[in-house]
């Protein structure tokens, strides 16, 4: 399988993916159904949207996180991953109850299309606001998207420590054999999330 490259989406592709995510969210929450083949035809995915890419869907309600789930690596076409993870973020994020219909008007969708992971040695290779992180050791794995560190005012060290904690590891696990990966992401949303 050829190495995946970071996808570069046009503004019209970003808009189409957001519309696809919104249509998926509305139908799933209101009826518990996926979009039909006829409904999907309206979105006409481009060649770029048919490529594989890691992607996360973030649902925010009135500025607070309401669900966030995604794929670290591209296992399916981007547009299909957007559909699958919109449903997952709305109904399968273990931190939240499923999204209810009365919440839909207050929910904003953000999409983070990830570059491939790149293993790094330490904090000096992390640029806050540009990179997201994955930390893993044995069966433990944690991921924080690039926008998280600036939202919380973290420097690169705190960002790395928080990613270790998200993995269920000690704060300084990165000093004790855990692998560190960075990635960048194209982040876009219905509102600035």
Image (cartoon, grey):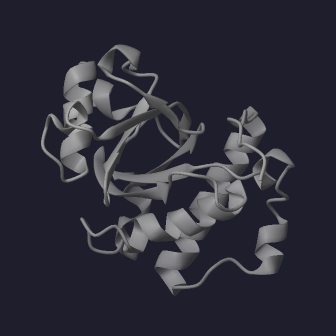
Above or below: residue 103 compared with residue 19: below
Q: Nearer the viewer, residue 86 or 136?
A: 136
In the rendered image, residue 135, in percent from the top left (x then y), is placed at 33, 42
Q: Quadrant of residue 34?
A: bottom right
Asked whether residue 45 appears in the rendered view, the answer is: yes
In the rendered image, residue 84, in percent from the top left (x then y), is placed at 57, 68
Q: Quadrant of residue 161?
A: top left
Q: Nearer the viewer, residue 96 or 15?
A: 96
In the rendered image, residue 134, in percent from the top left (x then y), is placed at 38, 41
Q: Residue at x 62, y 61 (%)?
A: 81
Q: Residue at x 28, y 20 (%)?
A: 156
Q: Residue furthest front?
A: 177
| Quadrant location of the C terminus in the rendered image | top left
155 sits to left or right of 147: left
149 sits to left or right of 129: left
Q: How many marks?
A: 0
Asked whether residue 154 appears in the rendered view, the answer is: no
Q: Nearer the viewer, residue 140 or 91?
A: 140
Q: Residue at x 77, y 73 (%)?
A: 39
In the rendered image, residue 163, in percent from the top left (x then y), is placed at 26, 40
């Amino acid at each position: 399988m050829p190495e995946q490259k970071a996808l570069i989406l046009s503004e019209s592709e970003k808009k189409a993916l957001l519309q696809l995510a919104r249509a998926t969210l509305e139908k799933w929450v209101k009826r518990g159904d996926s979009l039909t083949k006829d409904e999907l035809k309206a979105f006409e995915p481009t060649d770029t949207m048919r490529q594989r890419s890691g992607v996360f869907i973030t649902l925010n309600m009135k500025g607070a996180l309401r669900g966030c789930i995604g794929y670290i690596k591209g296992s399916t076409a981007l547009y299909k991953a957007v559909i699958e993870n919109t449903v997952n973020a709305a109904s399968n994020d273990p931190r939240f109850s499923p999204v209810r219909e009365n919440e839909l008007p207050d929910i904003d969708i953000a999409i983070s299309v990830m570059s491939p992971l790149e293993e790094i040695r330490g904090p000096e290779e992390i640029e806050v606001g540009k990179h997201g992180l994955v930390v893993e050791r044995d069966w433990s794995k944690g991921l924080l998207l690039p926008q998280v560190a600036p939202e919380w005012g973290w420097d690169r060290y705190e960002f790395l420590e928080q990613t270790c904690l998200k993995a269920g590891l000690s704060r300084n696990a990165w000093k004790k054999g855990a692998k560190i990966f960075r990635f960048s992401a194209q982040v876009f949303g219905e509102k600035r999330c």
